Amino acid sequence: MVSRVIPVDQFDLVIFGATGDLANRKILPGLYRRYCAGQIPEGSKIIGAARTEMSADEFRDQTRAAIAEHAGPMADDKKAVTAFLEILEYVAIDAKGDGGWDTLKSLVRTEAVNAFYFSVAPALFGDLAERLHTRGIAGPDARIVVEKPFGRDLASARALNATLAEYFDETQIYRIDHYLGKETVQNLMAVRFANILFEPLWNSQFIDHVQITVAETVGVGGRGSYYDKSGAMRDMVQNHMMQLLCLIAMEPPYHFDPDAVRDEKLKVIRALQPVAPADIVRGQYLASKDAPGYLEDSEDPESTTESYIALKCHVANWRWTDTPFYLRTGKRLRARTSEIAITFKAPPHSIFDEAEGEWRENVLVIRLQPNEGMNLKVMIKEPGPGGMRLVQVPLDMSFAEALGPEGADITDAYERLIMDVIRGNQTLFMRGDEVEAAWAWTDPVIEGWEKRGDRPQPYDSGSSGPDDALMLMHRDGRRWRDIRE
Ligand code: NAP
């Protein structure tokens, strides 16, 4: 199966923060891959901007190295790399300064789609927005892309929204959450809303519970003092995991249209109940033989920031009233894996005797990484003679296997999302009210443990997290799925 390349209009994309980690690891290599796929129309330009003084040629050299390191096998096509580098320009600009803006204005054409990617610290978003607007660089149809973190609580998110709204309309603001650009995450919507199969069962009458796991093997070393101001709740739950929860729990939108989808997600966030203290477990990883523990990585021996969190939450509406959602995410865990597991209830009556095999629940597993795909566990008869014996087997749909080599080459989330910005499609971007609603739910949870003075529990590096997280499910008669690749 050959993936289709949907053309976009000619564009000028300015990347603020073009010398930074995100630009070099994701944005520029991603754009190169789109170039190779034939999706960047002739005449389009990519303009790097940051404070560092360098020529366009030096920026091209930097990008060549970034492509070699991060663009995968496509980086071997030297001719394509050279042609791609020709569409790059560079301007030295300080977001807070006056220099460079006239040069930038002369490079950005009004007749092309204009997009401005703010791959810089959020403290600079306001300065960039203000200068792009007041200097007449961004027209009424220009788009700005802003990175996470979008605020650290409701008050700061509101302030940021208000600042951006001074210069840009909501339809011009693309708040990126790269989880929404993942193939499987979008497939979740396709599976739910393009098939009749699941939707009749998609409620608390038939679904026992939902588990969402985002496990990492790395610690926070290198960016410990930055992470320590955030923690797993702010860094992962408020944004990425909340988005996944929304896509599972939302009602069918009337159309696959940006506001229709985001309206439904917003309703889910608003229906989230406050989380009881007993339903939250926070942890900090301990040192291993060859790596320091969280307290050393964070450079604060007294830190109470969590590198792990598990919690149980409820969506209070007709569809989900009795179905708990269990969320967990952490660093230095046993394996790097992200998945959503939807566990169905038992059939109302079993016609089989116990001797015919142990009944196991149906589970739909949506894997985000590694090996994106879906897997439905069903009970069947064990093949062969010897009478009726039940056994659970997975109906496995790995995209790599189901769709052939093209399916295996899953477009990176950033590539897809940047092209959506050029297309002017906001479906996979968070709306301002959505972000604020997510913080409105998150803030009291954080304030609760801060007021109580709770300390995170230590857990072994390479484990599944703190023991109490196991208890969170055990006491409900359920268990977490194993964390494994
Ligand atoms: P980074 O490596 O620290 O890069 C920051 C960039 O901002 C550099 O290019 C820097 O270049 C530029 N910059 C700093 N001050 C500036 C100023 N006053 N005017 C203009 N440019 C300025 O950070 P990053 O990791 O790329 O992250 C960028 C943004 O993306 C942050 O908001 C981060 O939270 C978010 N994010 C990053 C990742 C990731 O994987 N890295 C993932 C999700 C979100 P000069 O020093 O040359 O000015």
Image (cartoon, grey):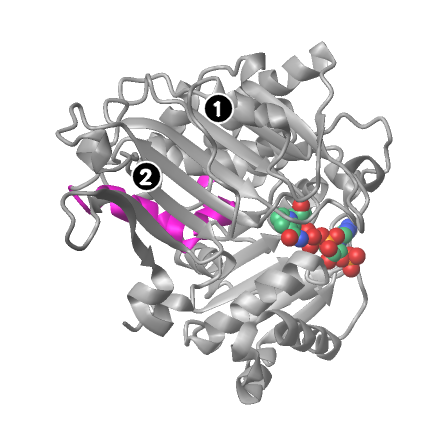
Residue in front for this viewpoint, 36 or 381: 381
- According to the picture, the residue beneath numbered tag 2 turns out to be 363
**Residue 255 spot, x, y in % from top left:** 23, 41
- Three-letter code, disc 1: Met
- CA distance for labels 2 and 1: 16 Å
Q: Residue furthest bottom?
A: 79
How many other residues sit within 10 Å of disc 1, few (<14), some (14-19) or many (≥20)? Answer: some
Quarter of the image with the N terminus in it: bottom left
Residue in front for this viewpoint, 391 or 124: 391
Q: Are marks 2 and 1 in contact (CB under 8 Å)?
A: no
Residue 211: quarter of image: top left
Q: What residue is drawn where x is 66% and y is 73%? A: 63
In reply to whether residue 435 is colored magenta, the answer given is no
Q: Judge left or right: residue 376 versus residue 231.
A: left
Q: Which residues are magenta?
A: 168-196
Q: Callout 1: helix, strand or loop?
A: helix
Q: Callout 2: helix, strand or loop?
A: strand
**Residue 317 spot, x, y in % from top left:** 32, 18
- Three-letter code, disc 2: Val
**Residue 206 spot, x, y in % from top left:** 24, 27
- According to the picture, the residue beneath numbered tag 1 turns out to be 473
**Residue 213 spot, x, y in % from top left:** 50, 39
Image height of 261 relative to 425, above or below? above
